[in-house]
Image (tube, rainbow, N blue to C red):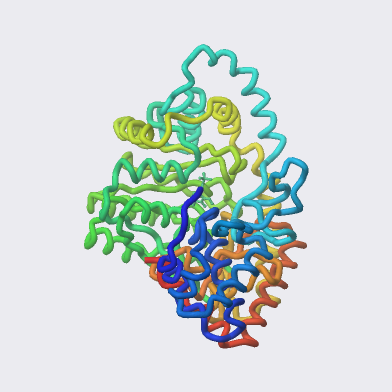
Amino acid sequence: MSGSLNPSSLARLLGEWNLGAAPAYRELADVVRLLVLDGRVPLEVALPSERALAATLGISRTTVTAAYSLLREQGFLSSGQGSRGRTGIPQASPRGSSGGADLSGAPGLAVPDGILDLAYASLPASGEVVHRAFASALTELPALLPGFGYDALGVNALREAIADHYAAAGVPTTAQQILVTSGAQHALNIVLRTLAGRSDKVMVEHPSYPNAIDAIRAAGCRLVPVAMPAAHPDARSGARPGWDLEAIEMALMQQRPVMAYVVPDFHNPTGRLMPDSQRRRLVRAAAAAGTVLVVDETLRELNLDGVASSPLAAFSPAVVSLGSLSKSHWAGLRTGWIRADESLIQRFAAARTTMDLGGPVVEQLAAAHLVGALTEPLPPRLASLRDNRDALLDLIASRLPGWQSERPVGGLSVWCRLPAPISTALAVVAPEFGIRLAAGPRFGTGGAFEHHLRVPFTLPPEQLETAVRALRSAQDRLEASPQLRRNLGTPPAAAIA
Ligand SMILES: Cc1ncc(COP(=O)(O)O)c(C=O)c1O
Protein backbone atom coordinates (compact mmCIF):
# COMPACT_ATOMS: atom_id res chain seq x y z
CA MET A 1 0.00 0.00 0.00
CA SER A 2 1.28 3.47 -0.74
CA GLY A 3 -0.04 6.91 -1.56
CA SER A 4 -0.63 10.02 0.41
CA LEU A 5 -3.42 11.76 2.19
CA ASN A 6 -4.03 15.37 1.32
CA PRO A 7 -4.60 17.88 4.12
CA SER A 8 -8.27 18.49 3.35
CA SER A 9 -9.11 14.75 3.27
CA LEU A 10 -7.40 14.29 6.63
CA ALA A 11 -9.16 17.36 8.02
CA ARG A 12 -12.51 15.90 6.94
CA LEU A 13 -11.73 12.57 8.60
CA LEU A 14 -10.58 14.31 11.75
CA GLY A 15 -13.92 16.09 12.19
CA GLU A 16 -14.11 18.06 15.43
CA TRP A 17 -10.94 16.87 17.07
CA ASN A 18 -9.81 19.97 18.89
CA LEU A 19 -12.13 20.93 21.70
CA GLY A 20 -9.66 21.61 24.43
CA ALA A 21 -9.89 18.58 26.74
CA ALA A 22 -6.16 17.91 26.52
CA PRO A 23 -3.21 19.64 24.85
CA ALA A 24 -4.08 20.12 21.18
CA TYR A 25 -1.16 18.02 19.93
CA ARG A 26 -2.35 15.11 22.08
CA GLU A 27 -5.94 15.32 20.83
CA LEU A 28 -4.75 15.49 17.25
CA ALA A 29 -2.55 12.42 17.74
CA ASP A 30 -5.39 10.55 19.53
CA VAL A 31 -7.82 11.00 16.69
CA VAL A 32 -5.27 10.17 13.97
CA ARG A 33 -4.40 7.02 15.92
CA LEU A 34 -8.08 6.00 16.01
CA LEU A 35 -8.42 6.62 12.27
CA VAL A 36 -5.42 4.37 11.62
CA LEU A 37 -6.57 1.68 14.04
CA ASP A 38 -10.05 1.37 12.62
CA GLY A 39 -8.93 1.54 9.02
CA ARG A 40 -10.35 4.88 7.98
CA VAL A 41 -6.78 6.03 7.32
CA PRO A 42 -5.05 3.16 5.50
CA LEU A 43 -1.64 1.85 6.48
CA GLU A 44 1.46 3.12 4.74
CA VAL A 45 0.00 6.32 3.41
CA ALA A 46 2.01 9.49 3.81
CA LEU A 47 0.33 12.01 6.09
CA PRO A 48 0.26 15.65 4.93
CA SER A 49 3.33 17.74 5.59
CA GLU A 50 3.33 19.52 8.93
CA ARG A 51 3.14 22.91 7.24
CA ALA A 52 0.21 21.96 4.99
CA LEU A 53 -1.80 20.30 7.74
CA ALA A 54 -1.22 23.21 10.13
CA ALA A 55 -2.45 25.63 7.48
CA THR A 56 -5.54 23.54 6.68
CA LEU A 57 -6.48 23.04 10.32
CA GLY A 58 -5.66 26.65 11.23
CA ILE A 59 -3.30 25.62 14.03
CA SER A 60 0.36 26.18 14.70
CA ARG A 61 2.94 24.07 12.97
CA THR A 62 4.42 23.26 16.39
CA THR A 63 1.18 21.49 17.35
CA VAL A 64 1.30 19.30 14.27
CA THR A 65 5.01 18.64 14.80
CA ALA A 66 4.33 17.52 18.39
CA ALA A 67 1.37 15.35 17.33
CA TYR A 68 3.44 13.67 14.62
CA SER A 69 6.31 13.04 17.07
CA LEU A 70 3.88 11.43 19.52
CA LEU A 71 2.51 9.21 16.73
CA ARG A 72 6.09 8.30 15.79
CA GLU A 73 6.91 7.44 19.39
CA GLN A 74 3.82 5.24 19.61
CA GLY A 75 4.71 3.51 16.35
CA PHE A 76 1.80 4.84 14.30
CA LEU A 77 3.97 6.91 11.98
CA SER A 78 7.26 6.01 10.31
CA SER A 79 10.23 8.26 10.91
CA GLY A 80 10.07 9.54 7.33
CA GLN A 81 13.36 11.40 7.36
CA GLY A 82 13.63 13.53 4.28
CA SER A 83 10.14 12.47 3.28
CA ARG A 84 6.71 12.48 4.83
CA GLY A 85 6.05 9.92 7.57
CA ARG A 86 3.83 7.02 6.63
CA THR A 87 1.10 5.51 8.78
CA GLY A 88 1.66 2.13 10.40
CA ILE A 89 0.85 0.10 13.46
CA PRO A 90 3.40 -0.69 16.16
CA GLN A 91 5.39 -3.90 16.01
CA ALA A 92 4.16 -6.56 18.42
CA SER A 93 7.69 -6.93 19.82
CA PRO A 94 11.14 -5.64 19.02
CA ARG A 95 12.25 -6.57 15.54
CA GLY A 96 13.98 -9.91 15.28
CA SER A 97 16.99 -10.60 13.16
CA SER A 98 14.74 -11.03 10.11
CA GLY A 99 13.51 -7.49 10.59
CA GLY A 100 9.89 -8.63 10.26
CA ALA A 101 7.04 -8.00 12.67
CA ASP A 102 6.47 -10.67 15.30
CA LEU A 103 2.79 -11.54 14.98
CA SER A 104 2.87 -14.43 17.44
CA GLY A 105 -0.22 -14.70 19.56
CA ALA A 106 -1.94 -11.81 17.81
CA PRO A 107 -5.51 -12.72 16.99
CA GLY A 108 -5.57 -10.21 14.19
CA LEU A 109 -2.90 -8.10 12.61
CA ALA A 110 0.11 -6.99 14.60
CA VAL A 111 -1.11 -5.02 17.57
CA PRO A 112 0.78 -2.86 20.01
CA ASP A 113 2.77 -4.78 22.58
CA GLY A 114 0.63 -6.23 25.35
CA ILE A 115 -2.63 -4.86 24.02
CA LEU A 116 -5.72 -7.08 24.17
CA ASP A 117 -7.41 -6.96 20.81
CA LEU A 118 -11.17 -6.57 21.14
CA ALA A 119 -11.50 -5.15 17.65
CA TYR A 120 -11.21 -8.59 16.03
CA ALA A 121 -13.89 -11.22 16.59
CA SER A 122 -11.75 -14.13 15.46
CA LEU A 123 -10.12 -17.24 16.89
CA PRO A 124 -6.76 -18.97 16.57
CA ALA A 125 -6.67 -22.07 14.34
CA SER A 126 -8.13 -25.36 15.42
CA GLY A 127 -4.50 -26.36 14.96
CA GLU A 128 -4.14 -30.10 14.76
CA VAL A 129 -7.09 -30.64 12.43
CA VAL A 130 -5.80 -27.94 10.09
CA HIS A 131 -2.30 -29.34 10.15
CA ARG A 132 -3.52 -32.85 9.36
CA ALA A 133 -5.60 -31.56 6.44
CA PHE A 134 -2.53 -29.89 4.93
CA ALA A 135 -0.47 -33.07 5.33
CA SER A 136 -3.12 -35.00 3.37
CA ALA A 137 -3.33 -32.21 0.79
CA LEU A 138 0.40 -32.46 0.10
CA THR A 139 0.11 -36.16 -0.64
CA GLU A 140 -2.72 -35.42 -3.09
CA LEU A 141 -0.98 -32.53 -4.80
CA PRO A 142 1.14 -34.53 -7.31
CA ALA A 143 -2.01 -35.75 -9.08
CA LEU A 144 -2.91 -32.14 -9.89
CA LEU A 145 0.53 -30.87 -10.87
CA PRO A 146 0.17 -31.80 -14.55
CA GLY A 147 -2.79 -29.39 -14.81
CA PHE A 148 -2.43 -25.62 -15.32
CA GLY A 149 -3.47 -24.82 -11.74
CA TYR A 150 -5.94 -22.12 -12.78
CA ASP A 151 -9.57 -22.74 -11.89
CA ALA A 152 -11.94 -19.85 -11.31
CA LEU A 153 -14.60 -22.20 -9.94
CA GLY A 154 -12.38 -24.10 -7.52
CA VAL A 155 -10.89 -27.55 -7.06
CA ASN A 156 -13.54 -30.23 -7.67
CA ALA A 157 -12.94 -32.18 -4.46
CA LEU A 158 -13.67 -29.06 -2.43
CA ARG A 159 -16.73 -28.05 -4.46
CA GLU A 160 -18.11 -31.54 -3.93
CA ALA A 161 -17.40 -31.48 -0.19
CA ILE A 162 -19.18 -28.12 0.17
CA ALA A 163 -22.15 -29.35 -1.89
CA ASP A 164 -22.39 -32.45 0.33
CA HIS A 165 -22.31 -30.25 3.41
CA TYR A 166 -25.36 -28.29 2.16
CA ALA A 167 -27.14 -31.51 1.19
CA ALA A 168 -26.58 -32.88 4.71
CA ALA A 169 -28.13 -29.68 6.11
CA GLY A 170 -31.26 -30.27 4.03
CA VAL A 171 -30.40 -28.20 0.95
CA PRO A 172 -29.76 -30.47 -2.04
CA THR A 173 -26.77 -29.00 -3.88
CA THR A 174 -24.50 -30.05 -6.74
CA ALA A 175 -20.82 -29.20 -7.08
CA GLN A 176 -21.80 -27.02 -10.08
CA GLN A 177 -23.65 -24.75 -7.66
CA ILE A 178 -20.48 -23.96 -5.73
CA LEU A 179 -17.70 -21.46 -6.43
CA VAL A 180 -14.71 -21.52 -4.09
CA THR A 181 -13.41 -18.13 -2.94
CA SER A 182 -10.68 -16.69 -0.76
CA GLY A 183 -13.07 -16.19 2.14
CA ALA A 184 -16.56 -14.75 2.55
CA GLN A 185 -15.40 -11.16 2.08
CA HIS A 186 -14.00 -12.09 -1.34
CA ALA A 187 -17.26 -13.92 -2.06
CA LEU A 188 -19.28 -10.78 -1.27
CA ASN A 189 -17.09 -8.69 -3.55
CA ILE A 190 -17.62 -11.16 -6.41
CA VAL A 191 -21.38 -11.06 -5.87
CA LEU A 192 -21.40 -7.26 -5.72
CA ARG A 193 -19.36 -6.98 -8.90
CA THR A 194 -21.78 -9.32 -10.68
CA LEU A 195 -25.14 -8.18 -9.40
CA ALA A 196 -24.85 -4.57 -8.26
CA GLY A 197 -23.92 -1.53 -10.29
CA ARG A 198 -22.94 1.92 -9.11
CA SER A 199 -25.81 3.71 -7.34
CA ASP A 200 -27.81 0.50 -6.98
CA LYS A 201 -29.45 0.04 -3.62
CA VAL A 202 -28.34 -2.72 -1.27
CA MET A 203 -30.31 -3.45 1.88
CA VAL A 204 -28.35 -4.25 5.04
CA GLU A 205 -29.26 -4.97 8.62
CA HIS A 206 -28.40 -2.09 10.91
CA PRO A 207 -26.03 -2.84 12.64
CA SER A 208 -24.13 -5.06 10.24
CA TYR A 209 -20.66 -6.46 9.61
CA PRO A 210 -18.34 -3.45 9.00
CA ASN A 211 -16.29 -4.98 6.20
CA ALA A 212 -19.47 -5.84 4.31
CA ILE A 213 -20.72 -2.27 4.71
CA ASP A 214 -17.37 -1.02 3.41
CA ALA A 215 -17.44 -3.43 0.43
CA ILE A 216 -20.95 -2.36 -0.54
CA ARG A 217 -19.93 1.26 -0.29
CA ALA A 218 -16.72 0.66 -2.23
CA ALA A 219 -18.83 -0.87 -5.02
CA GLY A 220 -20.54 2.53 -5.29
CA CYS A 221 -23.87 1.15 -4.06
CA ARG A 222 -26.35 2.98 -1.87
CA LEU A 223 -26.97 1.36 1.49
CA VAL A 224 -30.54 0.81 2.65
CA PRO A 225 -30.12 0.13 6.37
CA VAL A 226 -32.97 -1.51 8.25
CA ALA A 227 -32.77 -1.30 12.03
CA MET A 228 -32.57 -4.47 14.08
CA PRO A 229 -34.99 -4.20 17.01
CA ALA A 230 -33.38 -3.07 20.24
CA ALA A 231 -32.68 -5.78 22.76
CA HIS A 232 -35.20 -5.98 25.54
CA PRO A 233 -33.68 -4.71 28.80
CA ASP A 234 -34.00 -8.24 30.20
CA ALA A 235 -32.45 -9.79 27.06
CA ARG A 236 -29.85 -11.56 29.22
CA SER A 237 -32.58 -13.71 30.65
CA GLY A 238 -33.53 -15.19 27.30
CA ALA A 239 -35.92 -12.83 25.48
CA ARG A 240 -35.07 -13.00 21.76
CA PRO A 241 -35.57 -9.76 19.84
CA GLY A 242 -34.87 -11.24 16.36
CA TRP A 243 -35.36 -9.14 13.22
CA ASP A 244 -38.01 -6.54 12.39
CA LEU A 245 -39.59 -8.32 9.42
CA GLU A 246 -42.21 -5.64 8.94
CA ALA A 247 -39.53 -3.01 8.51
CA ILE A 248 -37.60 -5.28 6.14
CA GLU A 249 -40.72 -5.99 4.07
CA MET A 250 -41.47 -2.29 3.85
CA ALA A 251 -37.89 -1.40 2.85
CA LEU A 252 -37.87 -4.09 0.18
CA MET A 253 -41.22 -3.04 -1.29
CA GLN A 254 -40.57 0.70 -1.16
CA GLN A 255 -36.89 0.84 -2.05
CA ARG A 256 -36.64 -2.21 -4.34
CA PRO A 257 -32.92 -2.79 -3.65
CA VAL A 258 -31.12 -5.02 -6.16
CA MET A 259 -29.60 -6.95 -3.31
CA ALA A 260 -30.11 -7.55 0.39
CA TYR A 261 -27.10 -8.61 2.47
CA VAL A 262 -28.13 -10.43 5.64
CA VAL A 263 -26.43 -12.44 8.38
CA PRO A 264 -29.26 -14.54 9.83
CA ASP A 265 -26.97 -17.12 11.48
CA PHE A 266 -25.46 -15.62 14.61
CA HIS A 267 -25.53 -12.14 13.24
CA ASN A 268 -22.41 -10.04 13.58
CA PRO A 269 -22.43 -8.08 15.92
CA THR A 270 -25.59 -9.12 17.88
CA GLY A 271 -25.18 -12.93 17.81
CA ARG A 272 -28.88 -13.37 16.97
CA LEU A 273 -30.32 -16.31 15.05
CA MET A 274 -33.23 -15.66 12.71
CA PRO A 275 -36.11 -18.05 13.43
CA ASP A 276 -37.37 -20.17 10.52
CA SER A 277 -40.72 -18.34 10.48
CA GLN A 278 -38.87 -15.07 9.80
CA ARG A 279 -36.66 -16.77 7.17
CA ARG A 280 -39.79 -17.77 5.29
CA ARG A 281 -41.14 -14.21 5.34
CA LEU A 282 -37.78 -12.75 4.34
CA VAL A 283 -37.48 -14.99 1.31
CA ARG A 284 -41.05 -14.20 0.21
CA ALA A 285 -40.54 -10.45 0.60
CA ALA A 286 -37.26 -10.50 -1.37
CA ALA A 287 -38.88 -12.47 -4.20
CA ALA A 288 -41.83 -10.05 -4.33
CA ALA A 289 -39.46 -7.06 -4.54
CA GLY A 290 -37.16 -8.66 -7.14
CA THR A 291 -34.27 -8.43 -4.65
CA VAL A 292 -31.48 -11.01 -4.60
CA LEU A 293 -31.02 -12.25 -1.08
CA VAL A 294 -27.31 -12.65 -0.26
CA VAL A 295 -26.90 -14.59 2.95
CA ASP A 296 -23.62 -14.56 4.84
CA GLU A 297 -23.32 -17.84 6.77
CA THR A 298 -19.75 -17.28 7.98
CA LEU A 299 -20.75 -17.73 11.63
CA ARG A 300 -23.30 -20.51 11.14
CA GLU A 301 -21.21 -23.24 12.78
CA LEU A 302 -20.78 -21.21 15.97
CA ASN A 303 -24.10 -22.39 17.37
CA LEU A 304 -23.48 -22.04 21.10
CA ASP A 305 -26.89 -23.03 22.43
CA GLY A 306 -27.78 -25.66 19.84
CA VAL A 307 -30.89 -23.80 18.62
CA ALA A 308 -32.02 -25.47 15.37
CA SER A 309 -32.52 -23.53 12.14
CA SER A 310 -32.47 -24.31 8.42
CA PRO A 311 -30.02 -22.60 6.06
CA LEU A 312 -31.83 -19.79 4.27
CA ALA A 313 -31.30 -21.55 0.93
CA ALA A 314 -33.70 -24.25 2.17
CA PHE A 315 -36.51 -21.74 1.70
CA SER A 316 -35.76 -20.64 -1.87
CA PRO A 317 -33.51 -21.73 -4.74
CA ALA A 318 -32.94 -18.05 -5.55
CA VAL A 319 -30.91 -17.37 -2.40
CA VAL A 320 -27.18 -16.71 -2.81
CA SER A 321 -25.29 -18.14 0.20
CA LEU A 322 -21.78 -17.16 1.29
CA GLY A 323 -19.76 -19.44 3.53
CA SER A 324 -16.31 -19.58 5.06
CA LEU A 325 -13.93 -21.71 7.11
CA SER A 326 -12.68 -18.61 8.93
CA LYS A 327 -14.73 -19.08 12.09
CA SER A 328 -15.11 -22.86 12.24
CA HIS A 329 -11.39 -23.49 11.57
CA TRP A 330 -9.15 -20.52 10.90
CA ALA A 331 -9.25 -17.20 9.07
CA GLY A 332 -5.70 -17.88 7.86
CA LEU A 333 -7.04 -20.54 5.51
CA ARG A 334 -8.65 -17.75 3.47
CA THR A 335 -11.16 -20.21 2.11
CA GLY A 336 -14.84 -19.55 1.54
CA TRP A 337 -17.48 -20.14 -1.08
CA ILE A 338 -20.62 -19.04 -2.86
CA ARG A 339 -23.62 -21.34 -3.31
CA ALA A 340 -26.15 -20.28 -5.93
CA ASP A 341 -27.89 -21.68 -8.98
CA GLU A 342 -25.62 -22.95 -11.68
CA SER A 343 -26.11 -20.10 -14.16
CA LEU A 344 -25.34 -17.50 -11.49
CA ILE A 345 -22.25 -19.44 -10.48
CA GLN A 346 -21.00 -19.19 -14.08
CA ARG A 347 -21.55 -15.41 -13.98
CA PHE A 348 -19.73 -15.18 -10.65
CA ALA A 349 -16.80 -17.14 -12.12
CA ALA A 350 -16.61 -14.69 -15.03
CA ALA A 351 -16.66 -11.72 -12.64
CA ARG A 352 -14.08 -13.35 -10.40
CA THR A 353 -11.51 -13.47 -13.18
CA THR A 354 -11.46 -9.67 -13.19
CA MET A 355 -10.02 -9.88 -9.66
CA ASP A 356 -8.08 -13.14 -9.54
CA LEU A 357 -7.85 -16.33 -11.56
CA GLY A 358 -8.57 -18.86 -8.85
CA GLY A 359 -7.53 -19.96 -5.39
CA PRO A 360 -4.33 -21.73 -4.33
CA VAL A 361 -4.62 -25.47 -4.94
CA VAL A 362 -3.02 -26.88 -1.77
CA GLU A 363 -5.29 -24.76 0.44
CA GLN A 364 -8.31 -26.03 -1.44
CA LEU A 365 -7.23 -29.67 -1.14
CA ALA A 366 -6.77 -29.14 2.60
CA ALA A 367 -10.12 -27.35 2.85
CA ALA A 368 -11.83 -30.31 1.19
CA HIS A 369 -10.74 -32.45 4.15
CA LEU A 370 -11.86 -29.82 6.63
CA VAL A 371 -15.29 -29.36 5.03
CA GLY A 372 -15.65 -33.15 4.79
CA ALA A 373 -15.48 -33.33 8.59
CA LEU A 374 -16.68 -29.83 9.32
CA THR A 375 -17.92 -30.42 12.82
CA GLU A 376 -14.78 -32.24 14.05
CA PRO A 377 -13.02 -29.27 15.70
CA LEU A 378 -16.24 -27.68 16.92
CA PRO A 379 -17.05 -29.31 20.30
CA PRO A 380 -14.00 -27.96 22.20
CA ARG A 381 -14.22 -24.66 20.36
CA LEU A 382 -17.89 -24.21 21.24
CA ALA A 383 -17.33 -25.31 24.84
CA SER A 384 -14.68 -22.68 25.47
CA LEU A 385 -16.70 -20.03 23.64
CA ARG A 386 -19.66 -20.78 25.92
CA ASP A 387 -17.43 -20.36 28.99
CA ASN A 388 -16.02 -17.13 27.59
CA ARG A 389 -19.47 -15.78 26.74
CA ASP A 390 -20.84 -16.52 30.19
CA ALA A 391 -17.78 -15.04 31.86
CA LEU A 392 -18.04 -11.89 29.74
CA LEU A 393 -21.75 -11.44 30.43
CA ASP A 394 -21.13 -11.80 34.17
CA LEU A 395 -18.21 -9.40 34.08
CA ILE A 396 -20.23 -6.79 32.20
CA ALA A 397 -23.15 -7.16 34.59
CA SER A 398 -20.97 -6.84 37.68
CA ARG A 399 -18.25 -4.40 36.61
CA LEU A 400 -19.88 -2.11 34.08
CA PRO A 401 -22.97 -0.59 35.62
CA GLY A 402 -25.33 0.98 33.11
CA TRP A 403 -24.21 -1.32 30.28
CA GLN A 404 -26.91 -3.52 28.79
CA SER A 405 -25.75 -6.70 27.14
CA GLU A 406 -27.77 -9.04 24.98
CA ARG A 407 -27.08 -12.75 25.45
CA PRO A 408 -25.96 -14.03 22.03
CA VAL A 409 -27.08 -17.55 21.10
CA GLY A 410 -24.05 -17.97 18.84
CA GLY A 411 -21.20 -16.18 17.11
CA LEU A 412 -18.29 -14.47 18.77
CA SER A 413 -19.45 -11.23 20.31
CA VAL A 414 -21.77 -9.43 22.69
CA TRP A 415 -23.41 -6.26 21.40
CA CYS A 416 -23.61 -3.87 24.33
CA ARG A 417 -25.66 -0.76 24.83
CA LEU A 418 -23.56 1.84 26.64
CA PRO A 419 -24.88 4.22 29.27
CA ALA A 420 -23.87 7.22 27.11
CA PRO A 421 -22.89 7.87 23.46
CA ILE A 422 -19.19 7.27 24.11
CA SER A 423 -18.25 4.45 21.76
CA THR A 424 -15.81 6.40 19.58
CA ALA A 425 -14.38 8.13 22.62
CA LEU A 426 -13.84 4.76 24.30
CA ALA A 427 -12.08 3.44 21.19
CA VAL A 428 -9.80 6.48 21.17
CA VAL A 429 -8.68 6.20 24.78
CA ALA A 430 -8.78 2.37 24.95
CA PRO A 431 -5.13 1.71 23.90
CA GLU A 432 -3.95 3.74 26.88
CA PHE A 433 -5.67 1.13 29.04
CA GLY A 434 -4.26 -1.82 27.12
CA ILE A 435 -7.18 -2.70 24.83
CA ARG A 436 -8.12 -2.09 21.24
CA LEU A 437 -11.77 -1.56 20.29
CA ALA A 438 -13.88 -1.22 17.18
CA ALA A 439 -16.11 1.81 17.73
CA GLY A 440 -19.87 1.23 17.42
CA PRO A 441 -20.31 3.53 14.37
CA ARG A 442 -18.16 1.13 12.32
CA PHE A 443 -21.16 -1.24 12.39
CA GLY A 444 -23.59 1.20 10.84
CA THR A 445 -24.17 4.19 8.64
CA GLY A 446 -24.59 7.87 9.32
CA GLY A 447 -22.68 7.87 12.60
CA ALA A 448 -25.17 5.54 14.32
CA PHE A 449 -24.25 3.28 17.25
CA GLU A 450 -22.29 5.75 19.37
CA HIS A 451 -24.33 4.11 22.13
CA HIS A 452 -23.06 0.63 21.28
CA LEU A 453 -19.92 -1.45 21.49
CA ARG A 454 -19.21 -4.95 20.20
CA VAL A 455 -17.21 -6.92 22.73
CA PRO A 456 -15.90 -10.26 21.41
CA PHE A 457 -15.63 -13.22 23.75
CA THR A 458 -12.77 -14.79 21.84
CA LEU A 459 -10.33 -14.30 24.72
CA PRO A 460 -10.22 -16.63 27.74
CA PRO A 461 -11.99 -15.52 30.95
CA GLU A 462 -8.80 -14.21 32.68
CA GLN A 463 -8.03 -11.94 29.74
CA LEU A 464 -11.67 -10.92 29.48
CA GLU A 465 -11.50 -9.87 33.10
CA THR A 466 -8.46 -7.70 32.34
CA ALA A 467 -10.26 -6.31 29.30
CA VAL A 468 -13.42 -5.45 31.25
CA ARG A 469 -11.32 -3.79 33.94
CA ALA A 470 -9.70 -1.73 31.18
CA LEU A 471 -13.12 -0.84 29.74
CA ARG A 472 -14.17 0.37 33.17
CA SER A 473 -11.03 2.48 33.53
CA ALA A 474 -11.50 3.96 30.07
CA GLN A 475 -15.11 4.78 30.88
CA ASP A 476 -14.09 6.33 34.23
CA ARG A 477 -11.53 8.46 32.43
CA LEU A 478 -14.22 9.74 30.06
CA GLU A 479 -16.64 10.35 32.92
CA ALA A 480 -14.00 12.34 34.76
CA SER A 481 -13.52 14.47 31.69
CA PRO A 482 -16.94 15.21 30.18
CA GLN A 483 -15.38 17.58 27.69
CA LEU A 484 -13.08 14.87 26.37
CA ARG A 485 -16.06 12.55 26.07
CA ARG A 486 -18.04 15.14 24.16
CA ASN A 487 -15.22 15.98 21.84
CA LEU A 488 -14.02 12.50 21.04
CA GLY A 489 -17.59 11.25 20.90
CA THR A 490 -18.25 13.31 17.81
CA PRO A 491 -17.80 10.84 14.98
CA PRO A 492 -15.35 12.17 12.42
CA ALA A 493 -17.39 13.90 9.74
CA ALA A 494 -16.46 11.71 6.78
CA ALA A 495 -16.40 8.43 8.67
CA ILE A 496 -19.71 7.06 7.49
CA ALA A 497 -21.84 8.34 4.69
C1 LIG B 1 -20.42 -11.88 9.02
C2 LIG B 1 -19.03 -12.04 8.51
N1 LIG B 1 -18.80 -12.14 7.20
C3 LIG B 1 -17.56 -12.28 6.69
C4 LIG B 1 -16.47 -12.31 7.52
C5 LIG B 1 -15.12 -12.45 6.90
O1 LIG B 1 -14.98 -13.77 6.50
P1 LIG B 1 -13.69 -14.28 5.71
O2 LIG B 1 -12.57 -14.35 6.68
O3 LIG B 1 -14.12 -15.63 5.23
O4 LIG B 1 -13.45 -13.34 4.59
C6 LIG B 1 -16.65 -12.21 8.89
C7 LIG B 1 -15.49 -12.20 9.79
O5 LIG B 1 -15.58 -11.79 10.91
C8 LIG B 1 -17.95 -12.07 9.40
O6 LIG B 1 -18.17 -11.97 10.71
Between 201 and 243, the one lying in front of the other is: 201
The location of residue 53, given as percent across then percent down, is 48, 70
**Is residue 38 shown left or right of residue 203?**
right
Q: Residue at x 49, y 30 (%)?
A: 359
Instruction: Indicate the position of residue 403 as horizontal and vertical percent values.
Output: 59, 77
97 left or right of 203 in image = right
Which residue occupies 33% across, 43% down? 193
Q: Quadrant of the C terminus?
A: bottom left
Give the residue at the far front of this rendering. Answer: 82
| Residue 344 position by quadrant | top left
Q: Between 178 and 424, which is closer to the camera in this rendering?
A: 424
Is residue 230 in sight in this rendering?
A: no
Q: Relative to the observer, which residue lies in front, 122 or 387? A: 122
Percent position (x, y) of residue 105?
Answer: 72, 49
User: In terms of image quadrants, where is residue 375?
Assistant: top right
- Left or right: where 76 falls relative to 398: left
Residue 186 visible in the current orientation: yes
Q: Look at the picture and state if 176 lies above or below 185.
A: above
- Where residue 285 appears, as percent x and y from the top left, is 28, 54
Quick check: 200 above or below 471? above
In the depicted structure, whether residue 81 falls above or below residue 480:
above
Q: How many marks?
A: 0
Q: Residue at x 50, y 70 (%)?
A: 51
